[in-house]
Structure formats: structure tokens, C-alpha cells
Amino acid sequence: MISSQTEVRDGMRITFDAPIPMDDGVVLRADVFLPEADGRYPVILSYGPYAKGLSFQEGYPDQWNRMVEQHPDVAAGSTNKYQSWEVVDPEKWCPHGYACVRVDSRGAGSSPGYLEPWSPRETKDFAACIEWAGTQPWSSGKVGLCGISYYAMNQWMVASLESPKHLTAMCAWEGASDFYREFSYHGGLLSTFLGNWYDMQVKTVQYGLGERGAKSPITGEPACGDVTLSEAELAKNRSDLGADVLAHPLADDYHRARTPKWERLTIPFLSAGNWGGQGLHLRGNIEAFVRAASPQKWLEMHGIEHWTHFYTDYGRELQKRFFDYFLKGEQNGWDKEPRVHLNVRYVDRFEERYENEWPLARTQWTRFYLQPDGKTLSTNAPSSSGNLTYEALEDGLTFVTAPLEHDTEITGPSAVKLRISSSTRDADVFVVVRAFAPNGDEVVFQGAIDPHTPIAQGWLRASHRKLDPALTREYRPFHTHDVEQPLTPGTPVELDVEVWPTCIVIPRGYRLALSIRGKDYVYPGGSGGRLKSFKNELTGCGPFIHDDPRNRPREIFGGKVTIHITPDKPAYALLPIVPPK
């Protein structure tokens, strides 16, 4: 039986494995970090499956070593002994009058129970943990949520589905929000990430690994429970997440139960996204800002790796200003903060800029037409007709502009309009927005994970082309994914492909390009290497790839695709060109 213990160390009062009882008798475990002085403090809370006792440095050494080498401010001012993956460092929050609470979610780390990520049961547990933290004698009664990825995704859920009364504000840092469209399926195509992530990052810290699992570097106790279960027992105590998602290829009740209800999300929040987060979190942070009912919401967008800026002085000070205002009541001017804070991306740097809305009101929505002659891309509509055919599972076609006459900023969501036919009854379309330097080298960026990330990407399965008229915008098609509409071989259909948002200032003399492909983008300049926490090599899309033959059988998706272009029904990319202020 796990027992809690309290001690004073490194200027904090720490309780390890504090018990939090749930309504069904399961007792979850939390580590509580408090300032040394007695008092009642606002709470920064996180709830998730990565094992609070597993150190960042041990669990994710590749990410930690790169981060502290390139950003020494991350490690400065802390012993770093309490660093844990994707949650705040208490040594940098407790001295400022905050309590930090880390809860192991049901079935993970030190918390027993059935492991089922993002399930309704988890959301209910999360709400109970918030209420527990808001009623402790060391708590001011105001609870803020803060964390990256999983610790951000479930914030959308608990704030819109359970609405615990002590939840006061939240900072969702790079957190997907739509379980179907952003995590498990992209435009109707299965992303293999979820199943691989579950194997590599969650099963490895499941409760019951006990003595076979990692140990806490602070307490020396097992980070994954005080019992050691067999592999068969562990499997019985968890869902088969990859199989569950594969069994739900449409946006049905399974996915809806794991997706927030935006009209019910009314608390203040800061949504922080990453331009390089194609395939997981990027879209979610922006959708939350646009669609949530909260009157007090802010959007921040940055670049580089997924985990880095959460820990840099830039990110931490931004989070602290937000929480100081909403949890402490400090009149620090946050209420006057512009609602949109962009780190505008250039080929060699970022520049901060403030805006008031999303998409930007001054956007010049510009059509770049696919020209059938010469496979070029221009703002002039095509004057002739043509059909262009490619192998449905191969590299497809690329359309390129003339050298740009001016520096050109593209910031916002995009859409691609196509008329296609297939030699089979379905087709998967991969869209990549790209840029090339005058010497022909492709411009790529350090993405959230992959070091060679293109400007923007979108996906659509042709049989999932049905649009939701209430949510669709010309610049952001919204597909229902609730029905399959098979193709008739050889008969053209119209597709509106959503391309996830981006931000880039392309220099004069560079070329813009649009690739229509039959498979995932691959960076032509070589491998991006591997990270220990992922199964696949980084070749341009990070771990967000779509190659599961169970979802893309060759007999259905392996034919030929033809793009049909005529002057009255042109194909084009609608891009958000932003003029200078």
C-alpha cells in the first residue's frame, strides 16, 4: 500500500503520493509542492499518464539534453531535480507563492485503476482532483491548469464537460482539442501516432510495473506503483487504444465523448500553439481560441520544438503573468494584453507581433491557381483545360510559382479546392505547402518534433468530402466525417481540403509551391534522425504518418488519381496573404 510522506527540501514543503479518493473507491496519487512558509496558495495543477516520479532527464533524455544545451535559461535557477515531462518545475513556481500539484492519472504512475486515456472516466477524475486541490487547507481555492500536450488536451475536456467550481483559469500549451480531426484521423486518414505513442510513452509507465519500472530519483521508490504485475495482468488493466481508434473510422460517439463542447468552455484561458505542430496540436490551439465561448481568451503562437518554450524564460514568464492576474488578482495589465500574440516566422528568425483577432482582419485571401500547362502556380486563373494523373500512393505532382516579387507573409489557415477522379472507389489526398530558395533548396523548419518540417500540410480522404455547412468557412473547410461517400471510378468529384494554419514570411526571389501527393511528405534533404520516445525515423512529418495498410488497403487506395482543371472549375490554393501593418 502506497503511503504519503511530507518533507522540507530545496525551499519547498513536499508531500509525495498524497491520496485523492475518487467516487468509485479508486485512490489516485499526487505530489504536492508548497512554499516553505505556511499559507493558502493558488494551485497550478496537472493530471496525466506520464508518471510524476519519472524524471524528465531519464524519461526523455534526447529532448532534455537538446533543450538545456540550446536554452540554458531552462536549467538556470533550479536544481532540476523535480523536472518532469511536460509540466511546470515547482522550483520556479513555489518561490512565487504557488502550490504545484501533479496527479498521476488512473492506471498510470502511482495511481491504480483501469488505464484508458482521454476517456469520460478520466475527465470525471480530473474534475474531482481539481475540487480536491481547491479545498485543501493550503489552497486559496483558486486552481489553474498548466501543462503541455496531454496535460493541455484534457484541460479542454474538463473545462467544458465537468466545469469544477474551483477551476479558475488554464494555460493549454500545445494541446490538440478535436480527438478525431487532430489526433486519431487527419481528413479521414488514420494517423499511426496514437498507437505508437501509447506503446512508447504510456504503457512504459503503467501502474503495476512496480520493481520492473523506473524509480523516482527523489524518493527512490518505484514510479509505477508498489505492486509488480505480469504482462498479462497489465494488459487486462488497460484499453487497447490503437485498436479502439481503428475500430472507429468515422467521427462517432467514441470521438465525441473525447472532444470538448466549446459552447460550455467559459473560463479564462491562454492557448499557446506551435507553428510546427502539424499533425497534432497546432490546429487545436487555434480552434479553441476561435470557437470557445470564454470572453477572456488569448492565443499565443511560437515555433521550435514542442516542449522547449514552455520551459524557457519567455514561456514561463508569459504563463506567470497570466496566472498572477487570474489566480492572485495582481493588476499587472494582463487584461489589456492584445488577444493574439504571434512569433512571426522568417526563414532565419522569429519576430514578435501582437494582433487582435484570428484570422487576421487585414488578410488578403488570395487564390493561387494550379496551371495544367507546365505545372505552375499563379494568381491568374487558368485559360486552358487539362487533366493531370499520378500514382495514388506515390509522390504526386508539385506546382511552383515564379520567383516572388516581394517579401510575402502567409499567416493563417488555408484551403485547397480540387476536382479529382480515381481509378478506384476512393483516394487519399495529401497537400503540402512548400517554399524553395533561389538555389532550389527547400525551406524547412524545426517543427514541434521533426527538424525538417514544411510550411503547412493538409489531408483528405475523398470519401470523407462531405462538409458541415455551419462550421465551414471558405478558408477553413470543416468535414463531418460521419459518412463515407465512395467514388465512382473515373467520375470527378469536388474536394475542399483543409490545410492547417501556418505563419511564414517568404523572401523576395523565393518560390512558393504546392504538392498534391498520394503519401506523406518526405524531406528530400535526408533523415532527421530518431528520438528514443518514438518508433519511426524523422523524415519530414515526425511521428504523424499515415501508412497503416489496414486503413489504406492497396486495392482501394492504390490506383491512379487524376486532377481535372478547367477555366470554369479551376483548382487552387486559397492562401492568407498578410500585408504589413
Image (tube, helix red, strand yellow):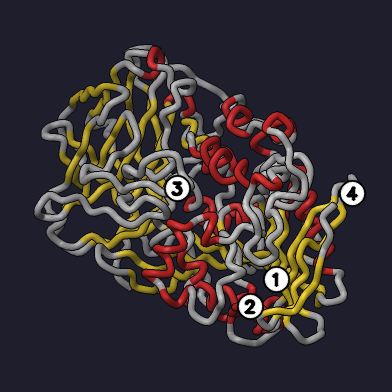
Q: Can you identify the residue that label 1 sits on?
A: 100
The amino acid pointed to by label 4 is: Asp
Q: Which of marks 3 and 4 is nearer the N terminus?
A: 4
Question: Where does residue 121 sit, x and y in percent of width and height?
Answer: 77, 43
Name the one closer to the observer, 536 or 16. Answer: 16
Whole-angstrom CA distance, mark 2 to mark 4, is: 31 Å
Whole-angstrom CA distance, mark 3 to mark 2, is: 29 Å
Q: What element carries label 1?
A: strand
Asked whether residue 208 is in view, the answer is: yes
Residue farthest along the left direction in this orientation? 439
Q: Evaluate if marks 2 and 1 touch, with contact meaning CB atoms under 8 Å apart.
A: yes
Q: Earlier in the sequence, mark 2 or mark 1?
A: 2
The quadrant of the image that shows the C terminus is: bottom left
Q: How many marks?
A: 4
Q: Can you identify the residue that label 3 sits on?
A: 532
Q: Evaluate if marks 3 and 1 touch, with contact meaning CB atoms under 8 Å apart.
A: no
Q: Residue at x 20, y 39 (%)?
A: 399
Direction from residue 338 to residue 499 in the image, left or right: left
Q: Can you identify the residue that label 4 sits on?
A: 23
Whole-angstrom CA distance, mark 1 to mark 4, is: 23 Å
Name the one closer to the observer, 264 or 521. Answer: 521
Q: Earlier in the sequence, mark 3 or mark 2?
A: 2
Direction from residue 399 to residue 374 in the image, left or right: left
Whole-angstrom CA distance, mark 3 to mark 4, is: 37 Å
The amino acid pointed to by label 1 is: Cys
Q: What element carries label 2?
A: loop
Q: Tell me if mark 4 has few (under 14), some (14-19) or many (20+) residues whose alpha carbon lies within 10 angstroms of its own.
A: few
Q: In this view, does 353 lie above or below 161?
A: below
